Amino acid sequence: MPEIKVPENEASEIKVAFLGLGVMGYPMAGHLARAGYAVTVYNRTTAKAEAWVEDYSAQLDDTAEIYMAPTVAGAVADADFVFACVGADKDVAEVCIGDNGAFASMKSGSVFVDHTTASAECARDMYAAAKEAGIGFLDAPVSGGEAGAVNGVLTVMCGGDDAVFNRAESVIAAFSKSCKLLGGAGAGQLTKMANQVCIAGIVQGLSEALNLAMEAGLDANAVVDVISKGAAQSWQMENRASTMINGEFDFGFAVDWMRKDLGIVLNEANNLGVSMPLTALVDQFYADVQKMGGNRQDTSSLIRRFRG
């Protein structure tokens, strides 16, 4: 890219890298660019990174500093903050400490913020490796789905050191409506586990309620209109009940991803000796949806077990 004038604001003095341009990472990196940060992106599929640069070059004025790098090491070398949103524990380890991983190339005192939903054990391991490398690390999984990422209103749950969080919080604000430090390394991931447990239970309850209403011959939309004004109200009801009734399930967070997350939850519960019978049951219900071919449908497709 040609040399670009740097905007005269505080953000322009901070260089960030974003690793992983999936459903969530693509718009999250975009919000950082919109906020005025100099952003370098990396994605395993180079074409996706090229598309991101082309997309945001068209959206932003000519003061924007946005780049792509062909390697993780190249993306993070000059960054003050490195953000990542990848698939699972193995992907986090690969991008952090694998061959040509980020930690070996990041400058001393920089900060790595991992938005992947992963295990608490992975977060603690990466925290320790980052500390040894002289960099800060936050495990910072997010909630809000694709719509939250696109609209820049994610909820971010963080684990790590106070000083590192205090430095990163204002940068994370570019794509979040809420960002909180919950404790030491792994606390963000543990909080995300609690979040996923609540979502799974609520979607199962909503599926049963809607199926009951429809089997009883009621106008399910009218039922939702009434009960959503009382104690039964939830985000899932407000945003997914009508689409569940209509059999529409293309809204972002996929069944495959929820099963990955619930697997992490159940493994952690086993390690802690915690009983989670409802979560284990709903996890198997999601397995039923996978058998029905619903792997990439969003989590509200749980109702398909009743309605096909």
Image (cartoon, rainbow, N blue to C red):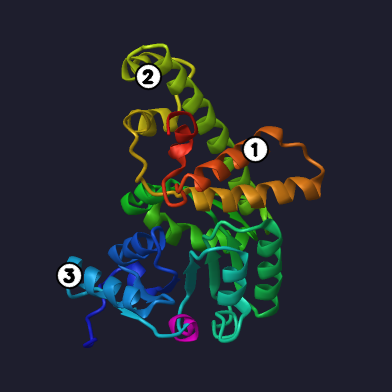
Q: Amino acid type of disc 2?
A: Val
- The local crowd at label 3, few if under 14, some if 14 to 19, many if 20 or more residues have their Cα within 10 Å, is few
The residue singled out by tag 3 in the image is: 58
The residue singled out by tag 1 in the image is: 279
Q: Are marks 1 and 3 in contact (CB under 8 Å)?
A: no
Q: CA distance from mark 1 to mark 3?
A: 44 Å
- The local crowd at label 1, few if under 14, some if 14 to 19, many if 20 or more residues have their Cα within 10 Å, is many
Q: Amino acid type of disc 3?
A: Ala
Q: Are marks 2 and 3 in contact (CB under 8 Å)?
A: no
Q: Where 147 sits versus 277, above or below?
A: below
Location of the N terminus (image quadrant): bottom left
Instruction: Tell me the mark number nearer the camera, choosing from 1 and 3.
Output: 1
Q: CA distance from mark 2 to mark 1?
A: 24 Å
Instruction: Tell me the mark number nearer the camera, choosing from 2 and 3.
Output: 2
Name which quarter of the figure residue 233 lies in.
top left
Q: Where 134 sits versus 242, above or below?
A: below
Q: CA distance from mark 2 to mark 3?
A: 42 Å
Label 2's element?
helix
Q: Position of residue 147 (x, y in %)?
A: 35, 47
Write the residue at 37% across / 15% down.
Answer: 223
Please provide the residue range marked out in magenta.
Answer: 72-77
Q: State which tag comes first along the sequence, 2 or 3.
A: 3
Write the residue at 48% across / 64% down.
Answer: 85
Q: Position of residue 107 (x, y in %)?
A: 54, 83
The residue singled out by tag 2 in the image is: 224
